Image (cartoon, grey):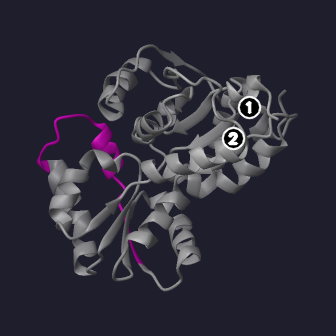
Amino acid sequence: MVASTHRDRPIGVFDSGVGGLTVLHELLVQLPQEDFVYLADTARFPYGERSQAELQEFSLQIAEELIRRQVKLLVVACNSATAAALPLLQERMMRTTLGVDVIGVVRPGAVHAVAATRTGRVGLLATTATVESGAYAEAIAAADPHVDLVQVPCPDLTEIIEGGFPFDQRVVDTVRRYCAPLREARVDTVVLGCTHYPLVRPMLQRMLGPGVTIISSGAPLARQVEHVLGSRSLQAGRTEGEGTYSFLCTGDPEPFRTMGTRFLQMPLGEVAQVDVAGGALAGGGPALA
């Protein structure tokens, strides 16, 4: 039986910026009794053009910070970090004395897309790092090798979305340009391979057409989190009321709080600034208690 102190620990969630708040939103809705701590690596945003080595180092540093905060589960709410670092994170986090499971956003979205497609033609909109990693191609092939995947790297879309509201003609033109090859390929399902992209979902739907199913990873990932908590007997001990959620960022907290409220669709409250560089997990040091 898992000790109640383990059950009552928070779930850690991280992303390069505010995009992962679209995932946190689904987690808060589907798992209202759980506590969450969200870390945004805004000082090093964006992740989309980073190398695999950089993303692995950043991810391990962030994991170290969240282990210090006694998380019971780690959610990588960033496609680029998931694609580059998930196996390494899973191996390192299970070696800590807490033995923490790690869940990424790629596989839940890929599996959902395979289930949704009617024609076997699936599109992917993602950062350059995510496309080049081949993570979605591998996950979709594992779920159904007969599904064709059309991948479109969107090197500037994340930064444009995070640049602020309201969206102007530049955003419209950029989204239309990235949708064009998917329309030409006649895909019937499109995976949003970046957690920022749900913010322009209405625009994407209009340009892709009403017959195209758009898949974002937040809801299927939340279901996987619920399953893992149940299988590990780690569900929060409370039976009534709502859990708490708190925020950390590596950059200036004020812009994150302002933009984050729009992404989360809930109040953020206080945001604490942290320095995550140089963690023991990244350097291969001893596991934390």
The magenta span reads 149-169
Say left or right for 266 vs 39.
Answer: left
- The residue indicated by pointer 2 is 60
Find out whether residue 157 is within the magenta segment.
yes
227 and 110: which is toward the camera: 227
Quadrant assignment, res 209: bottom left
Quote the CA–CA distance across marks 1 and 2. Answer: 7 Å
263 and 215: which is toward the camera: 215
Q: Quadrant of the N terminus?
A: top right
- Of the image marks 1 and 2, the number of the one nearer the N terminus: 2
Q: Residues within 10 Å of mark 2 (few under 14, many from 20)?
A: many
> x, y percentage for residue 113?
42, 67
Amino acid type at circle 1 is: Gly
- The residue indicated by pointer 1 is 279
Q: Which mark is residue 248?
A: none
- Please give the name of the residue rendered at 31% of the width and 51% of the height, measured from the top-left corner: 157
Residue 174 seen by the camera: no
> x, y percentage for residue 255?
35, 23
Amino acid type at circle 2 is: Leu
Residue 211, placed above or below residue 185: above
Quadrant assignment, res 193: bottom left
